[in-house]
Amino acid sequence: MPDNALIDTSNMSEGQRAALEMAEDSRDTREISGFAGALFMGQADFSRLFPFPQQSQKDKEAGDAFLSKLAQFLEQHTDPDAIDRDGEIPDSVFQGLADLGAFGIKIPKPYGGLGLSQSNYSRAAKLLGAHCGNLTALLSAHQSIGMPQPLIVFGTEEQKQKFLPYFANGQVSAFALTEQNVGSDPAKMSTEATLDQDGEHYTLNGEKLWCTNGLKASHIVVMAKTATPEKPYASTAFIVDTSWEGVEIVTRCHFMGLRALYNGVVRFTNVKIPKDHVVHQVGKGLKVALTTLNTGRLTLPAACSGAMQCCLDISLRWAREREQWGSNIGKHAAIAQKIADIRADQFATESMVQYVSALVDNDKKADIRIEAAMAKLWGTEAAWRSVDQTMQLKGGRGYETADSLKNRGETPDPIERMLRDCRINTIFEGSSEIMKLFIAREALDPHLRRGAAAIDSRLPMSQRAIAAAKAGTFYSLWYPARWLPIPANLPKNISPALAQHLNTVHKTSQKLARCMFHAMALNGPALEKRQILLGAFVDIATELFAMTCAIARTQALIDQDAKHPLHTIHYLCARSKKTIKQHFLTAKDSVAETSGYKLAQELLKHPAP
């Protein structure tokens, strides 16, 4: 049992205990400090978002220079529909992206990269997301979770000098974690690396599934089990050169969308890895993976905001041109609401991405684990809704391929391709369900720190009694305060039109904190099994985070006398209030949760006729 674990695992099965202890040992052990995490405690600290962080003019200009070249290259030298049709990205596109420095956007200049900020990287992801899902996946898998990001964060100076220039110049990298029987449970990992007798090399054996970029990568970060008697499920991250003997691409995987994804099964047979190719520390592989993903996840909502902008542009054009029943279809309420939803989703997603990107730029060690996970959860779900709504709005022309539309002389809007490409985003880099469990665990952390010891059967009664007394003292003050009509600490000079929405965030945050406390008191340690309940709590806080980011960004635009989206904010917040109300009802409906679970278990035993 790791020293910093807060959860009693004594009553769990060996498999449950192994998975939980491994995850706990690899968590960021800092107390939650960001705005999003505090929402679960009933503390909406608006000072963290107001004034909304603005990209400096110097940083923006550095990004503009690259983005202008990238946009021109994408427009003139890439054909997303041909890439989708052929299932291949032309060599000329690889070379062109390399010449632009697109494989080293965040790699520091001393190592040959562009050295651009997270904000500019997110802007590039938005541009790519609006243009081509395959190119987005290529560059994202390479530098968000592939070699550059883990080396920038965890690599030794020698590793950075040796490898980063390769990737800055256009070499492709990949990340290998998933296996045939291992998705989000790395305790079951079978790929293993053992230290040779010479103590200078590891021997790697195993097979990895769905290794994105694996077919094109010169190097892969491979997660492998490095068991010891003390830590039988420990894993380590290794740098593996794909040209080494024993590295084999078994097959290329093909998917519903992203048809030019260079994703495959990679097999490792007695691969010799030098000891200096360990990333971070032996036994700390999962920590490398989780930390990398914290920032890496931002790429997906950033790209999704671009896809949603594309959907909005297509929908607006069609709603103005298409006439039914004597008027443009945009005049019909059912169509107008779809357009409003797409606009609200796009603006909120982009606002979250801008905020979290600014956190990273202002402090490389910023605790963004909840904020990044919420942006990923909310933004990818929103993008899926937006593409689906756009297809519905365009009807048969949305379902028809771009090539077919072009052959008939119509505008070749790529909605059909976008729908196929977009669907993976709610699964990539942590599915929506896994994101909710991850956020829920972090949201419960402040309570576990204060109360877990009181119910930990492994501790002596005297120690449990002391912990219970301390927790009681804290909650005797904290809980009543969640009921008091304490005014929100609103930012100075907040627009009256926005103040009402921030008051809603404040009051809802207090209600959320109360409901979570009630759930903990009622369920005790069994709360972790109430995944529908916890998911509802996460959805509520995520809506509040999306609302607040969008409100703060709008206030910044008002302060700059820029065109501001008040209609968008009013619609977004009104819709979120309804959504949150439904989530609270879901949290209360334990009967539906229990009966649904029972039905599923019965079907698993005796399938319906």
Image: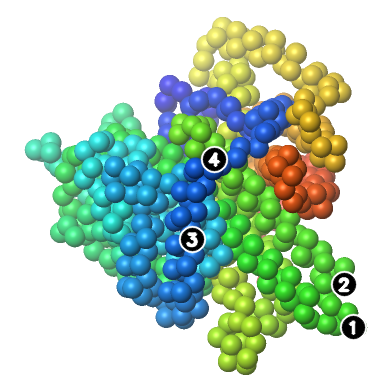
Q: In the image, is residue 418 above or below residue 67? A: below
Say which label, 4 or 2, has the lower sequence index: 4
Q: Residue at x 44, y 65 (%)?
A: 135
**CB contact under 8 Å: marks 1 and 3:** no
> Where residue 8 appears, x then y in whole percent?
53, 26
Say which label, 2 or 1, has the lower sequence index: 1
Say which label, 1 or 3, has the lower sequence index: 3
Mark 4 to mark 2: distance in Å? 42 Å
Residue matched to label 1 = 325
* Mark 3: secondary structure: helix
**CB contact under 8 Å: marks 4 and 2:** no
**CB contact under 8 Å: marks 3 and 4:** no
* Mark 4: secondary structure: loop
* Mark 2: secondary structure: loop
How many C-alpha atoms fall within 10 Å of the one at disc 1: few (<14), some, or many (≥20)? few
**CB contact under 8 Å: marks 4 and 1:** no
Mark 4 to mark 1: distance in Å? 50 Å
Say which label, 2 or 3, has the lower sequence index: 3
Say which label, 3 or 4, has the lower sequence index: 4
Q: Residue at x 44, y 56 (%)?
A: 66
How many C-alpha atoms fall within 10 Å of the one at disc 3: few (<14), some, or many (≥20)? few
> For this view, does 202 lie left or right of residue 498?
left
> For this view, does 442 lie left or right of residue 591?
left
> Where residue 585 appears, x then y in whole percent?
81, 44
Mark 2 to mark 3: distance in Å? 38 Å
Q: In the image, is residue 104 above or below residue 385? A: above
Residue matched to label 4 = 56
Q: Residue at x 69, y 53 (%)?
A: 347
